[in-house]
Structures are given as C-alpha cells and as structure tokens.
C-alpha cells in the first residue's frame, strides 16, 4: 500500500485533536473515527474500429505530460456511470450516443498527489467502443487527445496504476493466440 499523507489535524465532528490510527483512520480524544476513504474516480478505455485506444496527455498535475484516458472524480452523490458520462463529455466532447454502453473493466488503487498530500483514489475503469464518426477533442484538463494503436502503446507513459491495469487487460485480450 502506498504511503498516503493527508493533513487532518482536528475532528470534523467535535474539533478535538486527531491522531493517525492503523494508517487508514484518524481517531480523536472523544473517540470519533474519521476514515481515510478513497475518493472514487472513473475512466473510459475507448476503442475505435482500428483497435486504437483514445489517450489523453494530462495538462495538469499530477502526471502533467503523461498519458491518461478520459475520466475523473465522481462529484458528490454522483454514480460512477453518471460521472463517466459527464467526464467524457467534458474532456473529449463525446456524448453517450457516440460510444457503446460502457462495461466495467477493472478497478485499482491510485495515489493522487495534490496540494502537498497523497490521497487515496479508487480508480474504476470501464471500456467501450466508438459508435459514431465524431472525433474526440481535448478539453478541460486534457492537453491533447490521440488515437494510439494498442500494440504501440507504452504503458510506462501512462500515469495512473488503475489505468495501466485496464489498458493491459485490453492489450492482452487483443493479442493473437
């Protein structure tokens, strides 16, 4: 498990001083437990008819300049599927009519370095295929959007471990037996 570093000094329930207990929870003097829960994030491995995958260059940290897939954090009470639809539209301008219904692929744990902290993120990866001729365009926090042939993909250039895990599953499934 990565070494997570989150600054939590005071209990959000009573204001008492917190101490880290067992690496996954903080406990205050009053006995309240504040868990270091992972934030849910989603991503889409999107393939076209040429067995190319849509990859984004990250425009922001963490991982600025490295590769990623369209996706992002679930906002508030949003479901993973709702977050995925919103993020695909925000990041590459595709709505759900432009791709097949996403199916669950894999999940994983990602350390997310932000503001001097390393936060736990649960990356939930889906996959789908393009269903239209519309071309994705990089927007939001993506510097570019490019189709890359699966056999040319260098997983070492992909920032998040859960995304690498999902892409590896797709690459392995596409290999001739």
Image (tube, helix red, strand yellow):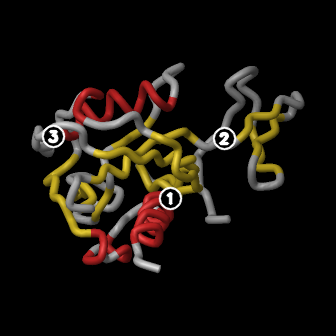
Name the residue that disc number 3 marks. Answer: 139
- Residue sitting at x 73%, y 21%: 13
- Numbered disc 1: secondary structure: helix
Question: Mark 2 or mark 1: which is in front?
Answer: 1
- Numbered disc 3: secondary structure: loop
Q: Is residue 58 visible?
A: no
Closer to the chain start, of discs 2 and 1, is 2
Q: Is residue 14 above or below residue 100?
A: above
Callout 3 environment at 10 Å: few (<14), some (14 to 19), or many (20+)? Answer: some
- Residue sitting at x 30%, y 76%: 151
x then y, percent, for residue 14: 75, 21
Q: Is residue 57 above or below residue 39?
A: below
**Residue that lies at the very extreme toward the front in this rendered image:** 177
Nearest the eye: 158 or 153: 153
x then y, percent, for residue 95: 24, 28
Name the residue that disc number 1 marks. Answer: 162
Q: Is residue 107 left or right of residue 161?
A: right
Q: Is residue 96 left or right of residue 9?
A: left
- Numbered disc 2: secondary structure: loop
Closer to the chain start, of discs 2 and 3, is 2
Q: Is residue 156 above or below residue 101?
A: below
Closer to the chain start, of discs 3 and 1, is 3
- Residue sitting at x 83%, y 29%: 32
Callout 1 environment at 10 Å: few (<14), some (14 to 19), or many (20+)? Answer: many
Nearest the eye: 18 or 82: 82
Q: Is residue 127 left or right of residue 55?
A: right
Q: Is residue 28 visible?
A: yes
The label on residue 37 is: 2
Q: Is residue 121 above or below residue 156?
A: above
């Amino acid at each position: 498990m990565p070494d997570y570093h989150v600054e939590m000094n005071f209990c959000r329930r009573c204001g008492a001083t917190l101490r880290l207990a067992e690496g996954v929870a903080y406990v205050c003097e009053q006995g309240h437990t504040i868990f270091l829960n992972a934030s849910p994030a989603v991503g889409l491995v999107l393939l076209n008819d040429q067995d190319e995958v849509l990859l984004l260059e990250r425009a922001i940290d963490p991982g600025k300049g490295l590769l990623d897939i369209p996706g992002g954090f679930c906002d508030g009470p949003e479901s993973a599927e709702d977050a995925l639809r919103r993020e695909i539209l925000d990041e590459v301008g595709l709505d759900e009519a432009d791709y097949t219904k996403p199916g669950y692929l894999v999940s994983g744990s990602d350390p997310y370095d932000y503001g001097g902290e390393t936060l736990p993120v649960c990356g939930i990866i889906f996959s789908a295929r393009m269903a239209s001729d519309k071309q994705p365009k990089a927007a939001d926090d993506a510097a570019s959007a490019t189709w890359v042939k699966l056999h040319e993909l260098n997983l070492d250039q992909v920032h998040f471990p859960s995304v690498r895990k999902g892409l590896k599953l797709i690459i392995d499934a596409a290999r001739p037996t």
